[in-house]
Image (tube, grey):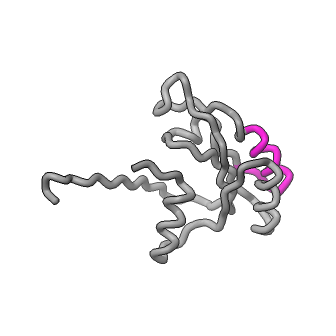
Amino acid sequence: MNIHEYQAKELMRSYGVPVPEGKTAFSPDEAKKVAQELGKGPFAVKAQIHAGGRGKAGGIKLVDDAEGVYRAASELIGKTLVTHQTGPHGKVVRKVLVEKASKIKKEYYLGAVIDRSRE
C-alpha cells in the first residue's frame, strides 16, 4: 500500500503524534489560501507523489510567505518530477502539501511490511 505524506501525517495525527499543521492543495491559488489560513511563514511546499527523494529532485520548496507558496505551487503542480525511485519517466505532481516549516534536528523514515506467512 502506498500512501502520500499528507495521508501518513493525518494517520499519525489521529493517534496523537504531533505533526506540522498543513493541508493539500490542487492549484497555486488553493495553496496560497492554505498558507493564508496557516498564518505567518515560513512554509514548506511539498510535491505529493509516491516516490522518495522528492527534496533532492526539487519537489520540496521552502518559502517565507503566501506569495512564495503560490510561486512554489505553480512550479510544482503539473511538473513531472524525476527521482531515483521514479526512474527516467518520472511522476506528474497533481497536488502539494502546504505546511508550516519545521526546524529539523533529526529525520526518521518509517516502513511497515505485512508478513502473511507469519500472520
Asked whether residue 76 is drawn in magenta, I would say: no
Q: Position of residue 13 (x, y in %)?
A: 52, 71
Taking 100 as reference, is 70 above or below it? Answer: above
Q: Nearer the viewer, residue 12 or 115?
A: 115
Asked whether residue 68 is drawn in magenta, I would say: yes
Name the residue: 13% across, 56% down: 118
Taking 33 as reference, is 28 above or below it? Answer: above
Name the residue: 71% across, 39% down: 76
Taking 95 as reference, is 99 above or below it? Answer: below
Residue 110 picture quarter: bottom left
Does the magenta stretch mainly form a helix, a strand or a loop? helix
Q: Position of residue 96 (x, y in %)?
A: 67, 49
Name the residue: 75% across, 67% down: 38
Residue 88 placement, left or right of 31? left
Query: What residue occupies the far bottom of the structure in this picture?
Result: 16
Q: Nearer the viewer, residue 17 or 102?
A: 17
Stretch in magenta:
62-75
Q: Position of residue 9 (x, y in %)?
A: 53, 63
- Which quarter of the rendering shows the C terminus? bottom left
Residue 97 placement, left or right of 3? right
Name the residue: 76% across, 48% down: 27
Query: What residue occupies the far left of the structure in this picture?
Result: 118
Q: Position of residue 37 (x, y in %)?
A: 79, 68
Taking 48 as reference, is 18 above or below it? Answer: below
Residue 32 placement, left or right of 79? right
